Image: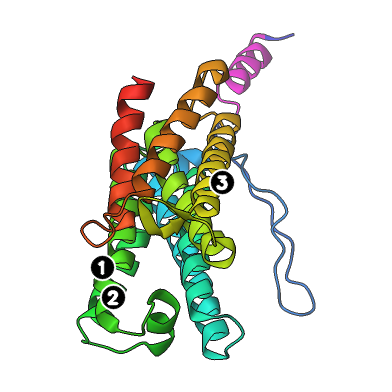
């Protein structure tokens, strides 16, 4: 090899043109018949996780609890309204006697309210949502009792004589006790359960059975009968134990049944004696029975 050819080879090696290493080449096809162009090769794009680009929408726990309890309130309120409206209609059509309709509403509305408490969440504020249900009924009683409006079906199903002012006594005391028990005792205490069990189940059943079969009167109160008082004792006790079992199964209360059963029996006996006293003209049963029950249950369970 000559000296000239050696220099030429060296010059060629130094100045050889090579494509830049970072160049990305895109290849395009010619336009197709319909005028479109197909993209054959694209640069490799790094994988992007969706959560890095779009934040997920998460409902806060407080808002979720609020929505849940609000929905439970609407459901229970609808059930309570349907119950009263159903007995209003039965009374209006003379299918049920006014007195029987009144007592059935007295029994069922309170017990169904008790049964509905586990529907609400475990939040400490859930009791306020539950108490809103009898509060609405309280406002209805006030509006009709003060003659600001007239709901004939409501008046017939909840009063003895058809007088709207009766709504401001027994029925109003009844819903106020429901509100009080929900706010103060709620699901954690057996005191509210037993109090409402005696007022709704015991006193309500006593009036129905006593009026029908109560020919033998109590010596110290001719308006009360032995069969009525015995019915209150038995049904008040059974309803209270039944609701406590219901709450115990759901985990809201933990009770020693060996001591709970005799305590509830004693409380039922005291409430029955108070209900039989001739003090109805002074203190309504919807006040005397639950308040005495609360007091005795407070000391008994403590």
Task: Please tell me whether mark 2 sits on a helix, a strand or a loop.
Answer: helix
Q: Count neighbours of disc 3 (C-alpha within 10 A) and say few if under 14, some if 14 to 19, many if 20 or more.
A: many
Lateral position of residue 10 relative to residue 160, left or right: right
Q: Which residue is mark 2?
A: 166
Q: Nearer the viewer, residue 268 or 224?
A: 224
Residue under the point 46% across and 25% down: 263
Let me know if residue 70 is in the magenta part: no
What main secondary structure does the magenta stretch of the protein show?
A: helix
Q: Are marks 2 and 1 in contact (CB under 8 Å)?
A: yes
* Separation of marks 1 and 3 at Cα, in angstroms: 24 Å
Lateral position of residue 111 relative to residue 173, left or right: right
Q: Which quadrant holds residue 181?
A: top left
Q: Count neighbours of disc 2 (C-alpha within 10 A) and say few if under 14, some if 14 to 19, many if 20 or more.
A: some
Q: Which residue is mark 1?
A: 169
Q: Position of residue 278 (x, y in %)?
A: 30, 54
Residue under the point 26% across and 88% down: 149
Specify whether residue 135 is in view: yes
Lateral position of residue 111 relative to residue 182, left or right: right
First in sequence: mark 3 vs mark 2: 2
Quadrant of the frame with the C terminus: top left
Numbered range of the magenta stretch: 3-16
Task: Please tell me whether mark 1 sits on a helix, a strand or a loop.
Answer: loop
Colour style of the rendered protein structure? rainbow
Q: Count neighbours of disc 1 (C-alpha within 10 A) and say few if under 14, some if 14 to 19, many if 20 or more.
A: some
First in sequence: mark 1 vs mark 3: 1
Q: Which quadrant holds residue 139?
A: bottom left
Q: Nearer the viewer, residue 223 or 203?
A: 223
Q: Position of residue 239 (x, y in %)?
A: 55, 43
Question: Which numbered disc covers residue 113?
Answer: none
Let me know if residue 7 is in the magenta part: yes
């Amino acid at each position: 090899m000559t000296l000239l050819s050696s220099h030429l080879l060296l010059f060629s090696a130094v100045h050889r043109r090579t494509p830049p290493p970072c160049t990305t080449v895109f290849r395009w096809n010619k336009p197709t018949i319909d005028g479109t162009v197909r993209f054959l090769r694209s640069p490799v794009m790094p994988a992007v996780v969706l959560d890095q680009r779009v934040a997920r929408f998460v409902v806060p726990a407080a808002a979720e609890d609020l929505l849940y309890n609000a929905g439970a309130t609407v459901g229970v309120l609808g059930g309570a309204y349907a119950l009263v409206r159903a007995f209003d209609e039965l009374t209006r059509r003379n299918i049920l006697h006014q007195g029987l309709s009144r007592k059935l509403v007295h029994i069922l509305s309170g017990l169904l309210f008790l049964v509905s408490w586990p529907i609400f969440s475990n939040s400490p504020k859930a009791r306020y949502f539950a108490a809103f249900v009898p509060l609405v009924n309280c406002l209805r009683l006030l509006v009709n009792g003060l003659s600001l409006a007239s709901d004939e079906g409501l008046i017939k199903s909840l009063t003895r004589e058809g007088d709207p002012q009766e709504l401001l006594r027994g029925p109003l005391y009844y819903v106020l006790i429901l509100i009080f028990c929900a706010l103060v005792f709620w699901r954690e205490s057996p005191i509210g359960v037993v109090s409402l069990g005696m007022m709704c189940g015991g006193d309500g059943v006593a009036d129905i059975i006593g009026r029908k079969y109560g020919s033998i009167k109590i010596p110290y109160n001719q308006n009360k009968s032995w069969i009525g008082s015995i019915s209150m004792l038995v049904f008040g006790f059974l309803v209270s134990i039944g609701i406590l079992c219901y709450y115990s199964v759901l985990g809201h209360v933990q009770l020693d049944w060996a001591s709970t059963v005799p305590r509830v029996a004693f409380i039922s006996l005291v409430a029955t004696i108070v209900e039989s006293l001739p003090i109805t003209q002074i203190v309504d049963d919807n006040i005397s029975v639950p308040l005495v029950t609360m007091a005795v249950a407070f000391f008994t369970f403590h």
